[in-house]
Image (cartoon, rainbow, N blue to C red):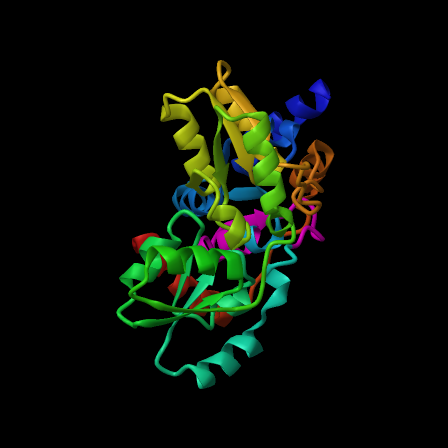
């Protein structure tokens, strides 16, 4: 493995490439990355990088987002089949149909959507800025897509808004249940329960904190507490343990794994860099339209 790591580093330097990885990637991919973060952090990094090539260790919508924000750069997705089931639950036609049904509403799309959906909405958001983005919309009525669980959490924070949720969900986070919370409280009564806003509402209502992955990392670093129960995809434990070696972390219930996030290996990154394989390409008109919603999110 050491040879592979060295080859990746050498190639990245030679080709002026940056490797971005999501918090849910496997340990060795997170460790080779130049930057590891959540969707919002990765969007900002992709926007600000001066690298000529962006290797995106994540899923397709994330690589598309990097390309939308950086049309002049080459964006590589090491595993072309790494998709997102939640993103695939909604398409542009569904958004256009809802526009006719709710002509007075602002349309907010979770960044976990394909480029064609981003091109049809008013603004994008991530789990870490969803409340801020929705609050900034002048419309009282908000169509929020595609995650019904994130929509429910936003609605609880902003009772002055009428949130109309699309019926999509993350298959990983949707598996968390209240029985897991009850058992976790029994086993670790001194620990705080941190959950992602993509979990079902009955679970988030029982948690101590509802936080994005970056929010969990920040909270764990700064909290005087030393024991935490984590309700999100298990890949975040890599950073939590690395950044907080004197604190204890337990997963909420059974291990929850995103199969698509775990597809990317060091070998995939090496081949992608060598051959510049799986470059993300988008029609320019679609890219421009999608960029409006993303740029508005970043400005907020």
* Residue 286 painted magenta: no
Q: Residue at x 56, y 36 (%)?
A: 15
Coordinates of residue 236 in the picture (x, y in percent): 56, 33
Residue 72 visible in image? yes
Vertical placement of residue 210 versus 243, above or below: below
Q: Quadrant of the N terminus?
A: top right
In this picture, residue 111 sits left or right of residue 296: right
Q: Residue at x 46, y 84 (%)?
A: 101
Coordinates of residue 78 in the picture (x, y in percent): 67, 44
Q: Quadrant of the C terminus?
A: bottom left
Q: Residue at x 65, y 33 (%)?
A: 26
Magenta residues, as a range?
Answer: 63-83
Which image quadrant for residue 22? top right
Coordinates of residue 73 in the picture (x, y in percent): 50, 50
Viewer-nearest residue: 266 or 134:
134
Viewer-nearest residue: 272 or 242:
242
In this picture, residue 182 sits left or right of residue 289: right
Residue 58 visible in image? no
* Residue 74 painted magenta: yes
């Amino acid at each position: 493995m050491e040879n592979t790591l060295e080859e990746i580093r050498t190639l990245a330097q030679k080709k002026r490439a940056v490797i971005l990885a999501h918090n849910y990637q496997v340990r060795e991919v997170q460790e080779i990355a130049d930057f590891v973060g959540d969707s919002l952090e990765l969007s900002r990094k992709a926007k600000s990088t001066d690298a000529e090539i962006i290797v995106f260790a994540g899923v397709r919508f994330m690589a598309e987002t990097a390309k939308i924000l950086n049309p002049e750069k080459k964006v590589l997705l090491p595993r072309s089949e790494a998709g997102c089931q939640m993103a695939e639950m909604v398409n542009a036609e569904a958004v256009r149909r809802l526009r006719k049904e709710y002509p007075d509403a602002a349309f907010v799309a979770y960044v976990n959507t394909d480029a064609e959906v981003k091109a049809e909405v008013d603004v994008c958001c991530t789990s870490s800025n969803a409340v801020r983005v929705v609050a900034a919309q002048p419309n009282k009525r908000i169509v929020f897509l595609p995650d019904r669980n994130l929509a429910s959490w936003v609605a609880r924070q902003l009772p002055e808004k009428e949130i109309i949720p699309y019926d999509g969900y993350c298959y990983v986070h949707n598996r968390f249940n209240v029985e897991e919370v009850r058992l976790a409280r029994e086993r670790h009564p001194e620990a705080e329960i941190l959950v992602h806003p993509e979990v079902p509402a009955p679970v988030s209502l029982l948690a101590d904190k509802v936080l994005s992955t970056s929010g969990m990392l920040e909270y764990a670093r700064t909290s005087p507490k030393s024991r935490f129960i984590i309700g999100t995809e298990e890949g975040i434990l890599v950073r939590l343990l690395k950044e907080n070696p004197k604190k204890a972390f337990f997963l909420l219930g059974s291990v929850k794994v995103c199969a698509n996030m775990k597809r990317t290996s060091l070998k995939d990154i090496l081949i992608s860099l060598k051959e510049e394989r799986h470059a993300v390409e988008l029609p320019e008109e679609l890219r421009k339209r999608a960029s409006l919603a993303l740029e508005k999110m970043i400005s907020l």
